[in-house]
Amino acid sequence: MRHFRPDPVPDALIREILEAGICAPSPGNSQGWDFVVVRELPLRHELAGMLCEGVRPLLPPASAVSDPSKRRLLESAHHLVDHALDVPVWVLVCGRPVYPASAPSVDWIASAVYPAAQNILIAARGLGLGATFTTWHMPSEAAVRSLLAIPDDARIAVTIPIGWPARAFGPVRRKPLDDVAHWERW
């Protein structure tokens, strides 16, 4: 979901979504995640501006793509860029090297933060909210880190816009299971 109404999301719902995030599995139950929640209007607008400034030049025009599925995705991404200031909540899912305890390694961060981020998306949808994974922080990561005071040892893994959907949820479009499931051997 990349089409959001600007209506605020109650803090209680954001807390419920984050509670789902911290229920995710992590290596050795290390729980090496942190969440930066941006709700306040001036900070939200500053963050959205940075994100869009970095991402906008990287998005090809949707009309240049012939595959209908990819075209829809690009149209939706362009819509989010054009309306990022309307997103009522941004959650940045971050991780630190905390596992294994004897020799913490950045190699284990993803196995903690991505399940937490997925739980956030599922919880948001279960509450009637829209959300999507983005990596929009990447082109302007230094500025985002500075703006949000994210420590140097924390990796920003996912930037998730969250809000009330401006259009109806549709069914997810995925490859058929038989195209990707391999029984016993590849």
Image (cartoon, helix red, strand yellow):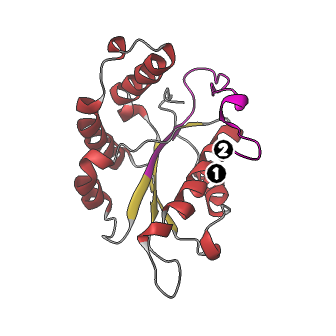
Q: Measured from the top left, where is residue 35 in percent x and y?
A: 49, 60
Above or below, comparing residue 127 to residue 11 in the picture: above
Determine the residue positioned at 66% across, 54% down.
16
Q: Is residue 164 magenta?
A: yes
Q: Amino acid at mark 2?
A: Ile
Q: Residue furthest right?
A: 184
Q: Is residue 94 above or below residue 58?
A: below
User: Image quadrant of residue 128?
Assistant: top right
Q: Quadrant of the N terminus?
A: top right
Residue at point 48%, 18% (across, down): 72
Residue in view at x 43 percent, y 55 percent: 157
Q: Residues within 10 Å of mark 1 (few under 14, many from 20)?
A: many
Left or right of residue 15: residue 62: left
Identify the residue under disc 2.
122
The residue pinned by badge 1 equals 119
Magenta part of the protein: which range? 158-186
* Side of 109 where 11 appears, left or right: right
